[in-house]
Image (tube, rainbow, N blue to C red):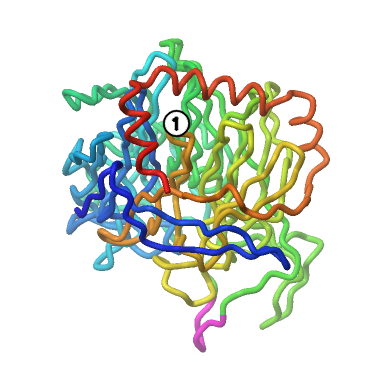
Amino acid sequence: MKLKQFSIALITVCLTIVFGPKAVEAVTLTTIVDGISNARGASFDSEGNLYVAEPGIGGDGNCQPSPSTLFQPICAGNSGSVVKVTPDGQETRLFDNFQSLAEQPSGYQGAGPQEVGFDSSGSAYLLTGFAGYPGNRDPELNALAASNNLEIPSEQLTTFPPSPPDQLLNTPDLTKLYKVDLNTQQLTEVFDFGEYEINNNPDGGDIVTNPYELTVSGNTAYVADGGGNAIYNIKLDGSNEVKTTSLPKNLIDNPVFPTLPPGEEIPPGLVEIPESALPVGEGEVPSQVLAQSVPTGAAVGPDGALYVGEYVGFPYPEGAARIFRVGEDGNPEVFLDGFTQITDLTFDKEGNLLVLQFSDESQLTGGDLASLPGSLIRVAPDGTRTTLVAAGEGLESADGVVVGPDGQIYVTNRGIGPEAGSLVRVDGIEGAATVPEPSSILGLLVFGAMGGGTWFKRKQQQNREAIAPELAQTLAQSAI
């Protein structure tokens, strides 16, 4: 791995954003650490140490077809880890050789360590992914599925069915939430998403799980399960209280489908055609489809509600991704819309919502999945949207966003492929052009009523004051 210390500003890309006729100041992406395989979520602890999850590249073990890869096999190995970077630039890998799944031989679409989070007392938690039918994970879950007489949807049996007992993945550490000791690297299991999916199937659809993103607030862990199309609310106080929220499917008008070779068809189960769009003749494209929501990013807002972004499943339409607000009643309401392939959300110190787009284009455009043009958008409390980094200006297949203890924005970039990923700092955004673009009256009312910017600024200031002064100085010196 090639490491750039926090105290050294290595400028990798120099960008100039032009929004309409107004030219704005240059924005730079400063690489902090690179060489990460299928880079995922990033986080900071109270001492300013950085943790980047590395799902790994799988290996030569048993395989299963995955809906995350359009049913191409992902195979087991021990190539996952968590990359730790100290404020002075020292890098180590924690939980090295962790269980991992990925396509072979490309090493794309890794599932393994997904993200590290910290509760209000500073305790650390680790989320691990999976991306498939949980009964394939290990003999224990395979037996549970058999004892439940699990009824698997017919489309799933065709596209990603259960594996025979002698071809199980044998990856019992995946699709779980752990409390972890970052010094001893000891894992204590908190929750098993695979077991819960088999017993409950929250969205009532395919029996699949892929815990993708972790947000910890107070003593509660929120997990976006992109396979199960659900958000988990897990209490960390020992009560074992768990709540789930399923996100509604997304009605897509005039969907665009890829051109298939002669004789090939779209696999069953990828899309659902609503009754209003039937009948569809042979060779005709339906006027509407219902795409799966696929939640991938979540953040607790200044008002205490949970905000959830969606990637939107096949056929991966542009401009159709929504952001939901989930309040105390647990009901998801559309807060904002008009985004494309959201992979993460967070709030900055001013209460602005930061939205990371994996790509501004459908992944069916034919480009390399590892280098699709992504973007970073800021939504102010009044609904004004500002493109901080536009498509084609340095973010490629970006997968995670976090605000650091220095108040600056950090993004995990190039989140697909072996050793391709990095964590970059977004510098020089002060002059970004803004355009009023309130997509949701609900959004304006919520932020306006709660005075979120003031609350969140005060909370972030408290966090920064808890950090050693020399650390803050080191981070400040690396800014451009």
For residue 21, say whether it is visible.
yes
Residue 330 position in % (x across, y down): 67, 26
Place residue 390 in its image quadrant.
Answer: bottom right
Place residue 283 in its image quadrant.
Answer: bottom right
Q: Residue at the spot x=32%, y=28% of the render?
A: 471
Q: Is residue 475 left or right of residue 239?
A: left
Q: Is residue 1 left or right of residue 248?
A: left
Residue 157 position in % (x across, y down): 45, 57
Say if the magenta span includes residue 263.
yes
Q: How many marks?
A: 1
Q: Nearer the viewer, residue 198 or 72?
A: 72
Residue bounds of the magenta highlight: 259-265
Looking at the image, the residue that sits furthest to the bottom is: 262
Q: Residue at the spot x=19%, y=24% of the render?
A: 183
Q: Is residue 249 left or right of residue 383?
A: left
Q: Nearer the viewer, residue 49 or 106?
A: 49
Packing grade of label 1 (10 A; few <14, some 14-19, many >=20) is few
Q: Residue at the spot x=46%, y=31% of the render?
A: 199
Q: Residue at the spot x=57%, y=77% of the render?
A: 258
Q: Is residue 15 above or below residue 346?
A: below
| SS for callout 1 | helix
Q: Nearer the viewer, residue 11 or 110?
A: 11
Residue 352 position in % (x across, y down): 63, 38
For residue 146, say whether it is visible.
no
Say if the magenta span includes residue 230.
no
Query: Where does label 1 land, which residue?
Result: 196
- The dominant secondary structure in magenta is loop
Q: Is residue 302 above or below residue 87?
A: above
Residue 191 position in % (x across, y down): 38, 26
What's the amino acid at mark 1?
Answer: Tyr
